[in-house]
Image (spheres, grey):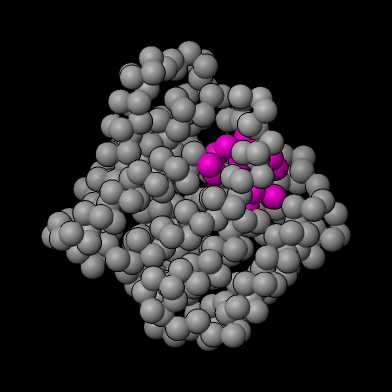
């Protein structure tokens, strides 16, 4: 097990970026058939149930959480319910490029806050990397980020990324020492409860369970909720919040490439240049 850790540490960031980027494609495919908050609540309910089944099969224990489980409730509420709930709603009002541009503010905000809150410090070359990341995302997004936006979507998008930043910093401060499997189960269950509360408060749910919607739901449950989120929290446990957050600079570019390859969407030379610049930014952040 110990011998696999260096290999996992090298692979995890790339796997996370690929899976997280693919989630944008999956969500766009499923949202026309299912209302966003209802979709989110069902997703986390199924993911929590599956992870609980895994825990029972392997006779997993919650003892490692000790009395820290309320911290994971906070993280689950911030990241799973409020961030993703807001992002889903925002994608109903904004194009994906605008949502990607809003999300690109997360790494820099985490880096700025992690100094006074977590004692993390970055070198000048790493700050250059954060700046290049934002520049690269702007190139990927292009002029599309300024068209078709509605005020409700913008407000929801900025609120959502604020909760994601808070959840990331909170996890790095209070949750690093706990075992990943029971911690992730608590967070998924909290996301499910929070999602159903959001449905009751803000949405008239509707769902047409087409083959596309069912496939999307299955992918989001198995690959994203159980896979990508576990990778994200693993990265936070083993690295700094600022360095981990820098990986989000890559998601708009990877999403654009996936959209071109899978959905036939256009991919401009400017977007490719932006992806290269963002990749350089992430390299500089992680090199330090």
Q: Is residue 228 left or right of residue 177?
A: left
Q: Nearer the viewer, residue 200 or 232?
A: 232
Kindly identify the residue that appears in the image at 67 percent across and 28 percent down.
3
Can residue 85 be seen?
A: yes
How would you classify the magenta stretch by its main secondary structure? Answer: helix
* Residue placed furthest toward the right: 124
Q: Is residue 14 left or right of residue 89?
A: right
Kindly identify the residue that appears in the image at 28 percent across and 32 percent down.
49
Q: Position of residue 31 (x, y in %)?
A: 27, 64
Q: Position of residue 13 (x, y in %)?
A: 61, 49
Q: Which residues are magenta?
A: 231-245
Q: Nearer the viewer, residue 243 or 82?
A: 243
Residue 192, quarter of the rendered image: top left
Please state the total of marks drawn on the protein image. Answer: 0
Q: Nearer the viewer, residue 211 or 281?
A: 211
Q: Quadrant of the N terminus?
A: top right
Kindly identify the residue that appears in the image at 73 percent across and 66 percent down.
280
Can residue 102 be seen?
A: no
In the image, residue 235 lies in the stretch drawn in magenta: yes
Above/below status of 39 relative to 157: above
Q: Nearer the viewer, residue 191 or 11?
A: 11
In the image, residue 286 lies in the stretch drawn in magenta: no
Above/below status of 239 relative to 23: above
Kindly identify the residue that appears in the image at 54 percent across and 63 percent down.
251
Q: Position of residue 56 (x, y in %)?
A: 33, 19
Above/below status of 160 relative to 90: above
Above/below status of 40 relative to 44: below
């Amino acid at each position: 097990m110990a011998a696999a850790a260096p290999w996992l540490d090298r692979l995890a960031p790339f796997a996370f970026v690929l899976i997280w980027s693919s989630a944008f494609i999956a969500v766009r495919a499923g949202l026309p058939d299912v209302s966003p908050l209802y979709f989110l609540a069902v997703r986390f309910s199924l993911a929590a149930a599956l992870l609980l089944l895994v825990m029972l099969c392997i006779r997993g224990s919650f003892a490692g959480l000790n009395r820290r489980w309320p911290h994971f409730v906070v993280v689950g509420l911030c990241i799973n319910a409020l961030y993703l709930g807001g992002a889903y709603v925002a994608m109903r009002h904004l194009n994906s490029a605008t949502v990607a541009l809003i999300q690109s503010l997360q790494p820099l905000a985490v880096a700025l806050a992690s100094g006074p809150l977590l004692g993390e410090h970055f070198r000048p070359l790493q700050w250059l990397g954060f700046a290049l990341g934002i520049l690269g995302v702007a190139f990927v997004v292009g002029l599309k980020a300024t068209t078709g936006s509605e005020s409700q979507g913008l407000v929801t998008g900025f609120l959502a990324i604020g909760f994601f930043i808070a959840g990331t910093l909170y996890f790095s401060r209070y949750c690093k020492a706990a075992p990943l499997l029971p911690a992730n189960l608590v967070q998924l269950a909290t996301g499910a409860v929070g999602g159903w509360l959001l449905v009751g408060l803000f949405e008239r749910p509707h769902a047409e369970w087409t083959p596309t919607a069912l496939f999307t739901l299955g992918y989001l449950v198995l690959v994203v909720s159980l896979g990508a989120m576990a990778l994200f929290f693993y990265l936070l446990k083993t690295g700094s919040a600022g360095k981990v957050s820098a990986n989000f600079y890559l998601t708009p570019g990877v999403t654009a490439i996936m959209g071109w390859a899978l959905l036939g969407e256009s991919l401009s030379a400017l977007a490719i240049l932006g992806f290269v610049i963002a990749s350089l930014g992430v390299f500089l952040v992680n090199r330090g």
